[in-house]
Image: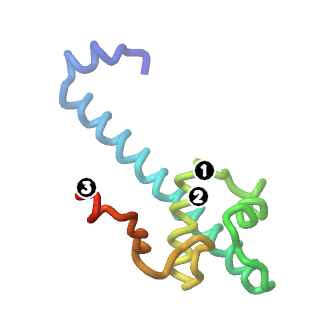
Amino acid sequence: MDLSMKYLRKTFPDQHSFLVRHGRELFNSHRSQATKAFDQMYLSEHNTLCETGVYASRRRVVERMQGQIRIGRRHEVQSAQRKVHAQTGVKLAGQRSGGIAARPDVGRKERRV
């Protein structure tokens, strides 16, 4: 279209709102498809590494995925990693099994702090 958005919004508000809503829905559907594809690829590479007996760290999995699919931002990779570890039951390397460790007593009761 060769119309300005301002003109379209003022002259045809219903059509403008439809186009905006449709564009947003299209973007969100493409985004969710890309996320699902990335998660599936991450899961397959993770399982391949686990079958060979190698701990599937995020770095190793991403190295194997390089060139096959667009690698997202760090939080997207981290999200895929958490989903895969939850599905497969493999613990994350730095994950603690307990709660918060008890803090050492530094004599606060005697100092009345």
Measured in 3D between alpha carbons, the distance from the residue under mark 3 to the one under mark 1, in whole angstroms, is 48 Å
Q: Is residue 70 left or right of residue 51?
A: left
Of the numbered discs 2 and 3, the one sitting upstream in the chain is 2
Instruction: Judge from the rendering whether residue 55 lies leftward or rightward of residue 86; answer left or right.
Output: right
Disc 1 crowd, CA 10 A, few/some/many (<14, 14-19, 20+): few
Instruction: List x then y, in percent, for residue 89.
Output: 54, 85
Q: Work out which quarter of the rendered image holds the N terminus and state it.
A: top left
- Identify the residue under disc 1: 72
Q: Is residue 10 above or below residue 92?
A: above
- Between tags 2 and 3, which lies in front? 3
Residue denoted by label 3: 113
Q: Residue at x 36, y 14 (%)?
A: 4
Secondary element at tag 2: helix
From the top left corner, tell me how far across and down residue 105 is, in percent.
38, 69
**Distance in Å between CA atoms under marks 2 and 3:** 44 Å
Q: Is residue 110 above or below residue 100?
A: above
User: Going 20% across and 16% down the picture, which residue do you hit?
Assistant: 10
What is the C-alpha distance between the residues marked 1 and 2? 6 Å
**Label 1 or label 2, whichever comes before in sequence order:** 1
26 shown above or below 109 = above
Q: Quadrant of the C terminus?
A: bottom left
User: Dot 1: what SS?
Assistant: loop
Residue 81 in the image: state x and y as whole percent: 57, 67
Q: Which quarter of the picture shows residue 24?
A: top left
For badge 2, the amino acid type reads Val
Q: Considering depth in this image, is 59 or 37 the residue closer to the camera? A: 59
Looking at the rendered structure, the kind of residue marked 1 is Gly
Q: How many marks?
A: 3
